[in-house]
Image: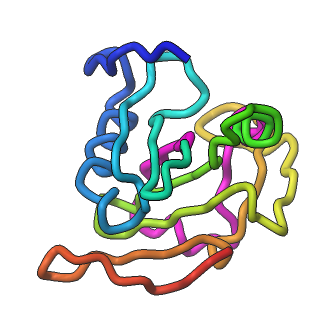
Amino acid sequence: MTKKPFVYGKYTKEEELALDAFKRAYTGCTSVTEFEPTSYGVYYDVWGKNKNGQVEHIELKLRKEGSDKYSTCFIEVDKWMNLLKDYRERQEKPLPIYINFIGDASNVYVWNLSKVKHAEFHGNIWIDGEVVDRIGLSWKDAWHFVQDETGNYNIVNKGN
């Protein structure tokens, strides 16, 4: 895949903030050793390579403070399907990673979608003024990291 450089201003403010949060948190919350933001329109936000040399396709989401108090975390159906399709069908088997930042980069949830055991389809739900379909993930299936006052990330929950 030919990657085009990430261009600030071409993304929504939320997407730019999520990328900035990833840049601050990736060393403490992932095994990614190198990464590059993807071009606009790709169904994942970051192409990465982990310490084992495996490619990761990473989707980022910045959520409002307290969003992790709900029973499920939503991911768009097409992103879920495309990330898993790449994992199953591409030769390099890129790991499908979904990262949620709650409020900012200090509260982070990380799912390896290839290991999610329970995901629920939620059809015709109302989000931000429109009716959409989503896949619901359990927060407890994610690796949960919280940044301490020294800037280090501590594991609160080891998910799948």
Identify the residue at the far left of this view: 150
Asked if residue 26 is positioned above or below residue 146 in the image, the reply reads above
Seen from the viewer's position, the closer of residues 3 and 24 is: 3
Give, as a single range, the part of the protein colored magenta.
Answer: 56-82
Locate the N terminus by quadrant: top right
Q: Position of residue 78 (x, y in %)?
A: 75, 32
Q: Position of residue 45 (x, y in %)?
A: 48, 34
Image point (62%, 77%), residue name: 159
Question: How many labels sit on residues?
Answer: 0
* Residue 131 appears anywhere in the view: no
Q: Position of residue 138 (x, y in %)?
A: 71, 70
Q: Quadrant of residue 153?
A: bottom left
Inspect the magenta stretch and tell me whether residue 68 lies in it.
yes
Seen from the viewer's position, the closer of residues 48 and 109 is: 48
Q: Is residue 30 left or right of residue 149?
A: right
Image point (45%, 36%), residue name: 46
* Residue 119 appears anywhere in the view: yes
Locate the C terminus by quadrant: bottom right
Image point (22%, 82%), residue name: 148
Asked if residue 98 is positioned above or below residue 68 in the image, the reply reads above
Q: Position of residue 40 (x, y in %)?
A: 46, 17
Image point (49%, 75%), residue name: 144
Asked if residue 119 is positioned above or below residue 91 in the image, the reply reads below
Query: Which coloring applies here?
Result: rainbow
Inspect the magenta stretch and tell me whether residue 150 lies in it.
no
Asked if residue 150 is positioned above or below residue 59 in the image, the reply reads below
Q: Is residue 113 left or right of residue 47?
A: right
